[in-house]
Image: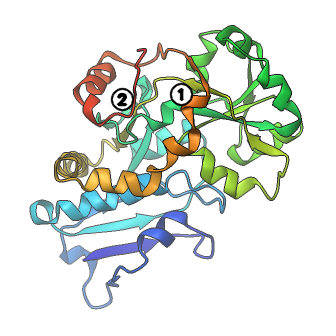
Amino acid sequence: MIWYLLRNNIGRRSCFMGKLLLGLVLFVSVFFPLKAYSLDVLKPHVSASSKDGRGDYYNELYIVIMEATKDDFGEYLVEVTPLEFSQQRAILEVVSGEKVNVTSQVARLDWEKKTIPIRIPISKGLLSYRLFFIHKDDLDYFSRVKDLEELKKTKMGLQAQWSITRALELQGFNIVDGTVYEGMFGMLNRGRFKFFPRGLNEIYSELNEWKLLYPDMMIEPTLSLFVPLPTFIFVSPAYPRLAERLEVGLKRIIKNGEFDKLFETHYGQAFSKAKFEKRIIFYASNPLLTPETLKAVQTYKKIMSWDKMKL
């Protein structure tokens, strides 16, 4: 049984709930008050944006984990409040646990200190592979970029609070900061920067979402950038039992193959689409990864998609 509540913005699209709950039987607590049950409450972050599906895989993963642990931990409640907020606000929300008590983020020190980290790389390192959105008029420019130093000089658009932004700033990349996710595509279209690097798990779905609005936007076909960006689940410190359940369940579905099956459903074609054999791959480091994160990457290197790690 899944208890499901959607708070606020009921008329707005929820990518996660639309895909996830299709075909599931939902039980509404009409005759049975929730207080009568000892339910774990899962409060994932679901974007209020109709074009932001970046969290779909992670939110579906939580449900697979929760289902895999029902015999140990019992039934659970999914409580969703569609929200838009910055990275700084996100960590405050997760720490409080009031509206959001679980999220998936690139590993970074502040998240690891303030929340309960589950140090298992749930995106298999796919976010580390960056392809570039560019304006079609700049295609010739990028055909002449042949080394990392040339790429560093080229204006790159990133959101100010993203983990990758600080890591690349420390290595001398020329970064133009943005503040709103949806606004980044318009900034690229207006020439505020020459390229917008996106994770291999993001770029193809984003192209589908934004191509009609920005028909001159394309994926650059010859270059890519690798930056070590392992993604972990982070849980509110107010919900230690939920953190335990998610870790137990994640290890279980890795062992029984459900994890690989879900990952393949979402991203199985990503590498073949990218055609890395035809690309120059530039390697950057990530000086912000903690020793605990580096250890976790090594522990779970068998599930990682990294062919070459420069940590």
Q: Return the x and y of residue 265 as percentages of the image width and height.
A: 41, 58
Residue on which the image places disc 1: 163
Is 147 left, or right, of 163 in this rendering? right
Q: Nearest to the eye among marks 2 and 1: give it.
A: 1
The vertical placement of 147 against 242, above or below, is: above
Residue at disc 1, secondary structure: helix
The reply to whether callout 2 and callout 1 are in contact (CB within 8 Å) is no
Left or right position of 267 against 35? right
Tell which residue pokes out farthest to the front in this image: 278
> Identity of the amino acid at label 1?
Ser
Q: Residue at x 32, y 75 (%)?
A: 3
Instruction: Please determine whether, in this image, residue 147 is positioned above or below residue 243.
Output: above
Res. 83 visible in picture? yes
Badge 2 element: helix
Q: Which residue is mark 2?
A: 112
Q: Which of the two residues, 40 or 203, is positioned nearer the viewer here?
A: 203
